[in-house]
Each structure stands twice: as C-alpha cells, then as structure tokens.
Amino acid sequence: MSVTEDKAALIVRKPAAAGVETPFMRFRSDFTDSWVATAALAVLCLIILIAVFAPLIAPQNPYDLGQVDIMESRQPPGSRSFQGYIFLLGSDGAGRDLFSAILYGLRISLSVGAMSGVIALAIGSTVGLAAAYLGGRTEAFIMRVVDIQLSFPAILIALMLLAVFGKGVDKIMIALVTVQWAYYARTVRSSALVERSKEYVEAANCLGLSHKRILFRHILPNCLAPLIVVGTVQTAHAIALEATLSFLGVGLPQTEPSLGLLISNGFEYMLSGRYWISFFPGIALLVTIVSINLVGDQLRDVLNPRLQR
Amino acid sequence: MSAPKPTLAVEDLCTYFFTKSGVVKAVDKVSFEIGAGEVLGLVGESGSGKTVTGFSIVGLIDQPGRIVSGSIRYKGEELIGASEERLRHIRGNRIAMIFQDPTMTLNPVLRIDTQLVEAITAHSDTDARTAWEQSRDALGQVGIPSPEERLKCYPHELSGGMRQRVAIAIAFLNKPNLIIADEPTTALDVTIQAQIIYEAQTLCRKTGTALLWITHDLAVVAGLADRICVMYAGRIVEEGGADNVIDRPLHPYTAGLIGSVPSHNRRGKRLAQIPGSTPSLLNLPEGCAFRTRCKFNDDTCLEEPEVTHPAKDRSLRCFHPVSRGPAP
C-alpha cells in the first residue's frame, strides 16, 4: 500500500459521497443531531440485543424449574448460589436469579409490545385507510367506533378482556391489539385524508390505476412518517400496559414472569429491606420505556414536516 | 362538422358544484371538438372553468361537483355515465392528463421507474423488463439526458422541468389518443416552457395524438394551438383558428386579453386592462357574464347571448363583436 494508491482511492470515492443526499442520509444526520436521542437509541439497541441473546448471557434459565431452588429465595445481590454462579442482582421469592429473570422478562415484554404493536398497526392502518378512501357513511361508522374505543381507558378494556380470556401471552396480545388499533386507525386516516387530496393521487387516478394500488402503493407509504412515530410511542405504551396487567396479576402466568410480574412479586418485600426483587426489574422497565420514548420523540421531531429545518 | 369522428366531442357540458352557499356553475354549456393530431388551446382567467372542463372529461369531478348535463364522446363513445371499469380503462390508456404543478404530480416516495412501469402494467400485460425499457425510451423521447440514471431517481432529486418532462413521458407512455394538459408549463421558467411545448408538439405530430392545452397564457397558445377556445365564467365565449382569434378577436373579452399582454412595442405606455375582476360564479350578472366589465355593454346584453357563427369556423357569444384589431 503506497500513499498514491490511498489518494487514488480517495478520489474515486469522493464523487459517490458528494452525490445526491438520499432521504435516509438526511434522516440519519437529523436524528443524530440530538445526543440524548442517539444515546437512547444505543441503549434501546443494547436492550434488544440482550433480550434476543438472553439464553446465552443469563447464568440460569429462570423458566426451567429444575434450575430454580426455592431454598435460595430472596438472596441479596452478590451472594453465591449453590450452582456456583453469583446472584448479581439477588434472587426473588421463588429462588430465581433476578439478573436472568430480568433478561428473560425483557424478552417477553419487548416481544409482546412489538408484536402487538405490529398487529395493531396492520389492522389500524388498513381500517384507517379504508375510512379515508371510502368516505361517507363507512368513514363515519369506522371513526365513531374508533372514538368510542378511545374514550374507554385502555387499562379497563384490557382488564375486562383478560378477565374473560384468562392468562397467557397470546391473550395479552389480543388485549393489547384491541386497545391499540384505534390510535393507528386515527393517525392513518388523518394523514391519508391529506394525501388523498394531493395531486399525485389524482394523477394516479388519471392513469387508471386500481384503488388497491393507489391505496397501498401510493397513499400508505406517504403516511408512514406519523405511523412510525405513533408506532414507537405505542410500543412503549404496550410494554407499560403489559407490565401493569402482569403487576395486577391478570397478564402472564407466574411460571413465566415478565418485568411487571417480577415487580409485583417483590413488591411486598420492599419495606422489609429486600428492595432488589422489585427494584431491579423496575429499573429495567424504566430504562426500556424511557429509551423508546426518547427515540420516539426524536423521530417525531425529525419526521414532522412542520419542524423541518 | 366533417365526416371523420373527432377524437373528443364535448357538447353542452354543464358541471355544477352544489355548495352550501349555492350552485356554482363552473362549466356551463361548453361545446368543442378535437380531431386527431389537433391541438386545441383552452384559454381563460383563473376560475373560468378550464380545469373543471378537463377534469370532467376524465370523470374526476369530486363531491360536491357533478356533471349535470351534456355529453362527452370519445371517438363516438359516450363517457358520461360509463361504468367505472370502462372509465379506468380509458383513463391513462386512451386519455391521459398532465397536471399543472410538476412538484405535486409525482408520488414523492416512489422512484421514477416504479411510477412509469406501473402506468404501463396497469393497462397491458407487458412484463416488467419490457415495461422498463419502454419507460427508458419514453424519458429519452421527452429530452431527458441519461434516462437510465434518471429512472433510478426519486422525484425530489429532479428539477421542476425534469419532473414535468417525466409527467409528460407518463402521459405519452401508453400512446393515448387524447392528452389533456392542464397548465403544464405555468410552474416552469420560459426556456424550459419553450422546450416542453416543443416536445409536446412534436410528440403530437408524430403520434397523431389530440391535445387539449389548458392555459391562461395566450402567448403559449398562439405558438402551439391549431384552434383556440376562450372561456369566461364557465362558458366558451369565442372559438376559432388560433391565428384568426389572435389577429382578429371578436369578443371584447378576447380583445381585452390580447390587449393586456405586455409588449415591447408599447413600452412606457399604460397597459390596457380589463376593468374589474372575474365575477363570482355564485352570482353571475344576468345575461352576458362579461357585461359588467365590457365597454360595449348596453340593454341588449341583459339577455343571454346565443352562439353565433360570424365567419366560417368561428363561433361567438356576444351581441357586440369587436370589429377589427385588438381593443385600444
């Protein structure tokens, strides 16, 4: 490798770099303007990675009853387990290593939040698009259903549904989707209404394209910006709601604790000095939700056309 | 008229908008014909109903507007009341439209090639590869340099003139028999405007496509159109051959329009202007709509002027045609 070769490489690369700025590049530079948001994004990525690779990181599988010993319950952080590893964050009432339980709990919380978010988004945006495009009575009907749905507190609807259905990951996802689709429907409808009156939709109509194509190919992609923002915020809501439901004991089964259930399990020991059983899952939940919300806030600032710099 | 069926025949078209404050007669008893390869210029001020006429032809009048009566025949086929299916087949395929603002007519999130290819595949079973090649050739035809690279661009990466060329390319893509161009050059600067008019003209001559060019700019129409229709307050007040109308306008409104074009010869002098402004379509003056701004206005104008044919291939809605030359 000589110096001249390096220079040649630089010259070759330059035109490409100086080329047209893609929307993604601008988005990235806008997003990284705020170091808080960048840090939050990094934390969020880290949390997701930890959750995905939990079985590789956790010293114990907290769902495997063979590995959990009731004799080791409520050990303080730093004490040594019978198997020889250290309870980094202590153990809970069932003798589960809290560090492992938090990792596995994050997995459940994140996947339940994200999955229900995606399903609610799919349902909500289809319904919202249909409302905006069809107009008239259909729209009025759909939007009144949305209004009614949104006028009930989310936790109330979810509690009622879970009381009927019972416990389980699938049931809690149904409950979360039910309380969330309306937010997406409302968001998509309002931006689709704006897009529908734009000239490119008229032009697409003039080209004789089918309604389906105009809806999903032309209008929906143009509504993505607000959807992404609502999606992020709603995912954080879903995680918090799931934790609340589990805390109230209607969410997930005791054998597979999510963060909410972990907090609830240690709640009664809070004042007896065994703070760690509730404290650490709480911190994990807090960090997750705050980082998602910070990312969502920044996304909103970047994607909001009215704040465009 | 003559024996061969015109590409488009509009007869007594009335498009009204039923608003809360009353009925807006945006297009009132409008009739014209365009033959194959012919360029018809539809001229008028803003709000005179030019665009609504264009939209009526492609059947894109939204609520609260409605085509109340009249007939629009495309090669003898009635379009008013035709099925949605049939209209969609004709739209984009046989009748294409070019819009005013090139920054708005392309979908901002789709690449140029996607938008061109889907315009082709919507109307034929062309496979993606052939459609892509056709798109590339179409861009080349409207004078876009290195079309292959441009195809990969997003609309925001192109300039306004480029985008309008793309829009024109899309309009010509399926070799339609009629193109409705709604002020396609208004948003562009004059040099680009001239280029685009030239491209449109040559494409029409080459393919025998009829062109309805909607504009408020007489200068553009003078150089482009074969025939001119002048619209005022929802009606066609004068029609005739382009040179004829420009050189010897008969309707005082046309004369006024021509007189108010700034020109080098009359520098320093006060520009002729038409007094007043376009009346609200909600309460048009009784009789001739131009009455209140017309200096030849008298009692006869209180009645509605019927269409007369003062010369061969000329028609007029006025009791007091200007005798000769533009208005002073």
Image: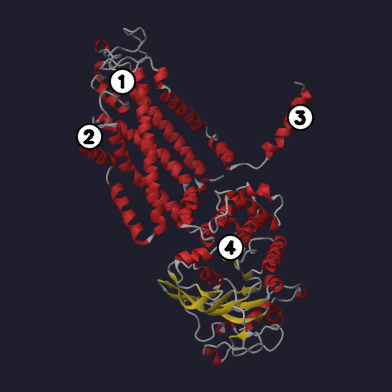
- Considering every residue shown, the one lying at the far left of the view is A164
Dot 3: what SS?
helix
Left or right for A205, reference B131: left
**Label 1 near label 2: C-beta < 8 Å?**
no
Residue B13 to residue A265: above or below: below
Disc 1/disc 3 C-alpha distance (Å): 58 Å
Residue type pointed to by label 4: Phe
Local crowd size for mark 1, using a 10 Å CA cut-off: few (<14), some (14–19), many (≥20): some
Picture coordinates of residue B160, whole percent (x, y): 64, 55
Dot 4: what SS?
loop
Please give the chain letter of the residue carrying mark 1.
Answer: A
Residue type pointed to by label 3: Ala
* Quadrant in the rendering for residue B106: bottom right
Mark 1 on the same chain as mark 3 = yes
Disc 4/disc 3 C-alpha distance (Å): 47 Å
Q: Which mark is residue B56?
A: none
